[in-house]
Image (spheres, rainbow, N blue to C red):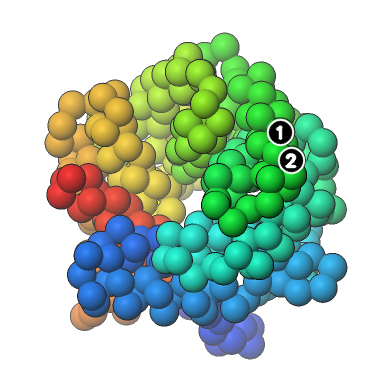
Amino acid sequence: MKRSPADLRPLLAIRPLRTATACGVGATACSRLADSPVWHGRARELGRWTAARQLRGRHAGLWSYEFDVQTRWGYYPSSMPNIVATTFCADGCLDSGTLDGSGAERLASGLLDGLYTGTHFAYTPASGTLIHNANLMGAALATRLAHLDAMPGRLAARLLDAARTAVSATVAGQRPDGAWPYGTSAGLGWVDGFHTGYVLLRLDAAARGLGLEHDKAIDSGVRYYLDHLFDGSVPRYYADTDEKPGRRGRLCGDPNNDATAVRMATWAEEHGYVRPGFAERVLAAVSRFVPEQAGLVGQAALTAPPVRRSPRWSLAPLLDALTALQAARSA
């Protein structure tokens, strides 16, 4: 499905879905431009729709994907929450001001009771595997929730304690060369671009929120990211190669990886890791893979692989990256 040049979904009776994850990312992106009434309205609309999709019952306060998922390390159904959907949805709601106090408290309790293992934040309630980007998403979200004015003090303290422990677990898992493998279990030792970007962005956010000094880990990770996951200004999918191990075919041009590269390039400029203008060069390098620069009009939209037209995997992350770049240039 992901690699097919044609959209096979109609043949497989897969119906279009509006996903909370895409809307949450979109709400965050639009919130950066909220000085404009148009973008403010978009952020509020997306945020309200996302907030309404918070789970109830056993996993109250969290979010899930609207479809079943099979990865190389596990399976989870649409009824089960996961940390990635929860983080992107929660951030969108918080950025757009559409998550009320009770919703934030349910989220905090659900995060601690359903996804915190005592040592790290798990990807799903059914998995104890340490996935570094997922763990730091949980840590950064827990830290953000703990600092909300309306968060009860005892619950805030639990959130901060869990976040500190989780950050320590991933910092300890950094390789000597500065890289983080995807996870700690067998078969999860690869290093790719967008998950490395997630790790660095969330480690920075969590460390700042916790008042921790992890400059050495971040500096080492950024050096690895820039040296091994870019070819000049062109982002690589896997470290030091454009090939997936064991398969033929270039993977440069994966839309989520490209969008995360632009987002990371912007962040790296803001923190002094690269010279000014690097983000624009990365954007120029990846733009040839974007149908009509995401306008989705004309022949380019019709011939682009379906994954490039996916709001969740392509267009929402790209909007997030572009608004982050715009906000940085306007600051």
Judge by depth and name the residue closer to the eye, 7 or 20. 20
Q: Measuring 51% from the left and 18% from the top, which residue is drawn there?
A: 213
| Crowd around label 2: few <14 · some 14–19 · many ≥20 (10 Å) | some
Q: Dot 2 corresponds to which residue?
A: 158
- Which of the 4 image quarters holds residue 122? top right
Q: Position of residue 70 (x, y in %)?
A: 72, 60
Q: Measuring 32% from the left and 37% from the top, which residue is drawn there?
A: 267
Q: Measuring 57% from the left and 69% from the top, which residue is drawn there?
A: 100
Are discs 2 and 1 less than 8 Å apart at CB? yes
Tell me: 276 left or right of 46. Answer: left
Tell me: 157 left or right of 300. Answer: right
Q: Which mark is residue 161?
A: 1
Q: Amino acid at mark 2?
A: Arg
Quadrant including the N terminus: bottom right
Asked if residue 70 can be seen in this view, the reply is: no
Q: Position of residue 283 (x, y in %)?
A: 23, 48
Judge by depth and name the residue closer to the eye, 187 or 324. 324
